[in-house]
Image (cartoon, grey):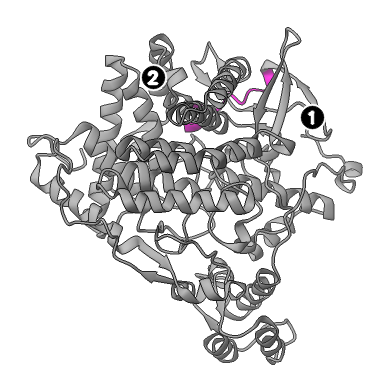
């Protein structure tokens, strides 16, 4: 993009869509966050800590006490004064939750990982299984009784938190916690409770929130609730759960396929196709990263440019890939984020699976008209993905950049040159969906493309080939990506694809095993170039716990087992 001296000072507004208002409490806590940064400095400063605080007294009382604190010329408060205020008027995030023993946890469930015969690996798997106890929480009664004093949302059922700084339930994390963790651990009641919490969020807001905090009401996350319902149903045959879930899933489908999330593409034949994009309902700094977003946006010269960047930052957070060069026009400049002008391969794969899932679940409860409607919707989306994303020559599905982000268009004309042909792990996510992995010819072509892409490394699949220092870029690998690609290859029925899947799973398990042995922790992300090293980059320090990493390791061990003569150590 060429920026002239004239255009640098002129901002064409490109920001569309509604904004969900935040709460007075969140606005106040943002101010506390800004003051804390000035007071304590940027070293080891985590802005999320301050918007997760809760109040010991009503907001006007706390706000007055905060306003009365003596300040220096730059607006900071003496450390002693600010710490005294925080102790007297605020509670930490962990006090909003209570540790609770899951009702269905046993130290070694019947039928647990029967194919894992290597004793050291089995002992480790049992330790990973035991982490569910460490991560199990229930919302405290003080939150339920006085929700206006807390940013944590009052959920009815116990939850599994990811770990470390993430002291709340997250949307897409929950799929790997539930369907690829708790179900392996035979913890069906805990899994069902989390699903019911997410259904309650849809009933309240019309969509599942990014996370169960008041400041996450302006965006969702990759829509995988239908996949959770399907997996719990397969294990429990709980028809009542299906009946409760179905209306919520239909409402969620509408959220992703109407308004600003919906985009119409006209193909070369003049036919139109509808696909979906990420588009947060927010155009201000994200509260949990308020000070960081302001610093990033201050690199831009005008208000409308900064406002658009805030929308792009929140939309990238909605994608789960926060942040990656995948969303950037200039891979070395975060201010060039353009998430809202991209049709993402993986989002549409998730929605395609949602359509197939709803059709199946509707059949379970005898809702034949819904079953037929969503079956047809899945066929339409599959066709749209074939036309817009698929690249036969490369053997991958590529994200599609909309033609001209400066125009608010109703229909975009398809242009092959708008496919982003850089290699990202997301290019291979459609393999996870039955309509794609059932075509063995396509699967083998995609598997060969994956092997030659440069993404497959010693310890797993990298998210990208660009080392940008963002956490969803090289050399980081993430558990959910490994799982979806591996499971898609396994389900294809191709012997070659299954062989590749097993190799990828072994690499990932060894990386997790080695890191656990050296650090005594499961990690949020891993360095796929160095077996046993956890990942880095991004806007916060590496986290441990960790919900989805635990779930994926357990499901890989359930699928592939671990032979007695197979070394779990890095090769």
Q: What stretch is highlighted in magenta?
A: 417-427
Q: Is mark 2 on a helix, strand or loop?
A: helix
Label drawn at residue 447: 2
Left or right relative to 93: residue 258: right
Label 1 neighbour load within 10 Å: few <14, some 14-19, many 20+: few
Q: Where 167 falls versus 370 (above or below)? A: below
Front residue (pair 404, 185)? 185
Q: Residue at x 56, y 42 (%)?
A: 248
Q: Residue at x 58, y 36 (%)?
A: 250
Total tally of numbered discs in the picture:
2
Q: In which quarter of the image is residue 481?
A: top left
Magenta stretch: includes residue 391: no
Q: Quadrant of the N terminus?
A: top right
Label 2 neighbour load within 10 Å: few <14, some 14-19, many 20+: many
| Residue 531 visible to the viewer | no
Label drawn at residue 404: 1
Q: Which residue is drawn at 38% across and 11% down?
A: 440
Front residue (pair 41, 191)? 191
């Amino acid at each position: 993009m060429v920026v002239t001296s004239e255009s640098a000072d002129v901002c064409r507004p490109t920001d569309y869509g509604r904004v969900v208002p935040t709460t007075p409490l969140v606005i106040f806590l943002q101010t506390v966050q800004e003051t804390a940064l000035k007071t304590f400095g940027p070293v080891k400063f985590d802005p999320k800590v301050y918007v997760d605080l809760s109040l010991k007294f009503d907001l006007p009382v706390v706000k007055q006490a905060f306003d009365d604190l003596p300040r220096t010329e730059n607006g900071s408060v003496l450390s002693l004064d600010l710490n005294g205020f925080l102790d007297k008027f605020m509670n930490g995030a962990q006090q909003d939750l209570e540790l609770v023993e899951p009702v269905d946890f046993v130290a070694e469930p019947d039928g647990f990982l029967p194919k894992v015969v290597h004793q050291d690996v089995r002992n480790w798997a049992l330790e990973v299984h035991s982490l569910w106890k460490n991560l199990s929480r229930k919302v405290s009664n003080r939150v339920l009784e006085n929700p206006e004093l807390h940013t944590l949302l009052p959920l009815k059922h116990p939850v599994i938190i990811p770990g470390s700084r993430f002291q709340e339930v997250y949307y897409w994390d929950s799929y790997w916690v539930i369907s690829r963790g708790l179900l392996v651990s035979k913890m069906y009641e805990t899994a069902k409770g989390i699903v019911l919490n997410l259904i309650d969020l849809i009933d309240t807001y019309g969509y599942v929130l990014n996370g169960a905090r008041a400041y996450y009401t302006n965006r969702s996350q990759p829509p995988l609730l239908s996949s959770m319902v399907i997996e719990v149903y397969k294990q429990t045959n709980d028809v009542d759960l299906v009946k409760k879930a179905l209306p919520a899933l239909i409402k969620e489908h509408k959220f992703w396929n109407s308004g600003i999330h919906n985009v119409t593409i006209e193909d070369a034949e003049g036919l139109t196709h509808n696909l979906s994009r990420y588009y947060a309902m927010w155009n201000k700094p994200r509260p949990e990263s308020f000070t960081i977003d302001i610093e990033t946006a201050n690199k831009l010269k005008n208000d409308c440019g900064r406002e658009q960047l805030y929308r792009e930052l929140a939309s990238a957070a909605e994608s789960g890939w926060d942040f990656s060069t995948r969303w950037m026009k200039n891979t070395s400049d975060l201010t060039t984020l353009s998430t809202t002008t991209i049709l993402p391969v993986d989002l549409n794969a998730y929605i395609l699976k949602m359509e197939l899932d709803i059709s199946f679940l509707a059949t379970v409860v005898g809702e034949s008209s819904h079953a037929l409607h969503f079956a047809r919707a899945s066929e339409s989306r599959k066709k749209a993905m074939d036309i817009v994303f698929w690249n036969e020559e490369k053997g991958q599905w590529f994200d599609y950049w909309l033609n001209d982000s400066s125009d608010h268009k109703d229909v975009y004309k398809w242009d092959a040159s708008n496919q982003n042909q850089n290699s990202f792990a997301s290019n291979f996510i459609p393999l996870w969906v039955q309509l794609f992995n059932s075509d063995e010819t396509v699967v083998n072509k995609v598997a060969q493309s994956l092997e030659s892409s440069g993404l497959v490394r010693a310890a797993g699949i990298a998210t990208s080939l660009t080392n940008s220092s963002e956490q969803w870029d090289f050399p980081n690998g993430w558990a959910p990506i490994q799982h979806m690609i591996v499971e898609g290859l396994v389900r294809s029925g191709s012997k070659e694809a299954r062989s590749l899947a097993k190799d990828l799973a072994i690499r990932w398990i060894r990386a997790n095993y080695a890191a656990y042995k050296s650090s005594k922790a499961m990690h949020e992300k891993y360095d796929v170039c160095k077996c046993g090293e956890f990942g880095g980059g991004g806007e916060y320090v590496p986290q441990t716990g960790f919900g989805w990493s635990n779930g994926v390791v357990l499901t890989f061990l359930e699928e592939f087992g671990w032979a007695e003569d197979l070394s779990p150590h890095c090769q």
